[in-house]
Image (cartoon, rainbow, N blue to C red):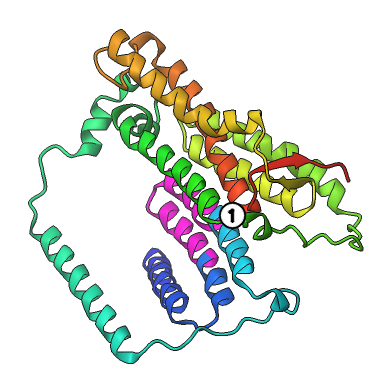
Amino acid sequence: MIDWAFDLLLAGGLLGLAWQIVATRMLFRSVVLFIVFGLLMAVTWARLAAPDLALAEAAIGAGITGALLLSAYRALLPPDSRDDGSDSPPPPVPPWAAVTVAVLAGALIAGIGWAVVGLEPPEQTAGRLALARLEESGVDNPVTAVLLNFRSIDTLAEVVVLFVAFLAARVVAQDLVHAGPGDWLRASYREPLLVQPLIAFVGPMTVLAAGYLLWAGADQPGGAFQAGAVLAALGVLLRLTGRLRPTEETSFAERLALVGGLVLFTAIGLAGAGVASAVLDYPEAWTYELILIIETALMLAIALPLVLLFSGSGGLRGEVR
């Protein structure tokens, strides 16, 4: 009975938050509700016994994406309204447009649902096949086995999409440096006494947590995406507290971190065509080691673009405070 009540509460909360996100007239409120929606979605994935998705949703869907939305919201505000926190509502949507979109979306969802219900369940699903051949993957976590071995082409495509998105943001928004939290720390700003001890404690612990998630991803929930999101959260914190300052130029080390994961993943995948049996196939004796190397490079390639997008800059430099 308690389980049913909890599940109904989760379902009702998700539907209610989703409605409030699209129905509210205040953009800032919509962003905040989206962050809350991501956290509740993480709880839902945990309830469905999918800890990997729960970690990814909490770190990426709610945490980093929420920070990016808040940064974008600030960039969209008029200069004279950034200090007083005012938020003018958007122009009203015509009723006919809202009804049309609702009807089309409902028809699309109903059509997809009807098609899915009519499908006969296959004898061998992808999940069962992955579990049956888990020993061949080199890792014990079926999620990592699928992402970095059985369907590694999909993961490689995701890394390409993230890299292209960062390049597109740099090309399209030439004034990105003004979108980040550049002038939040004014010359007259006096840092609270507890900020420095907090950074001294949280910084190493965050790096340790990211390293653990990376290492544990081979046989437990975790992996490059979760570890990269945790590192990106640390970068956001350092950026907000002035420990990192934005720069127009990207250093060689930053460029290496940005493309290193993609280049290394591609190189190892192409080498598999000669050493193993096909592209993106690994030698059986080195499967675990190669997956760990790829995930380490991917962690940096995931974390750095997210921090740079939040900062709205081409690079970052450390600053002693």
Name above or below for residue 183 compared with residue 161. Answer: below
Pick whichever, 140 or 269, lies toward us.
269
Q: Residue furthest bottom?
A: 95
Magenta stretch, overall SS:
helix
Residue 235 falls in which quadrant of the image? top right
Circle 1 residue: 174
Let me know if residue 53 is in the magenta part: yes
Magenta residues (range): 35-62
Could you say where residue 111 lies in the image, as x and y percent from the top left?
14, 67
Q: Give the quadrant of residue 164.
A: top left
Q: Relative to 105, does residue 145 appear above or below in the rendering?
A: above
Residue 276, by quadrant, is top left
Q: Is residue 261 magenta?
A: no
Q: SS at mark 1?
A: loop
The amino acid type found where label 1 is placed reads Gln
Which quadrant holds the N terminus?
bottom left
What residue lies at 67% left-to-right and 57% top-to-bottom? Answer: 180
Whether residue 281 is visible to the viewer of this picture, yes or no, is yes
Residue at x 63% of width, y 37% of height:
209
* Residue located 34% across and 11% down the image: 283
Q: Is residue 222 visible?
A: no
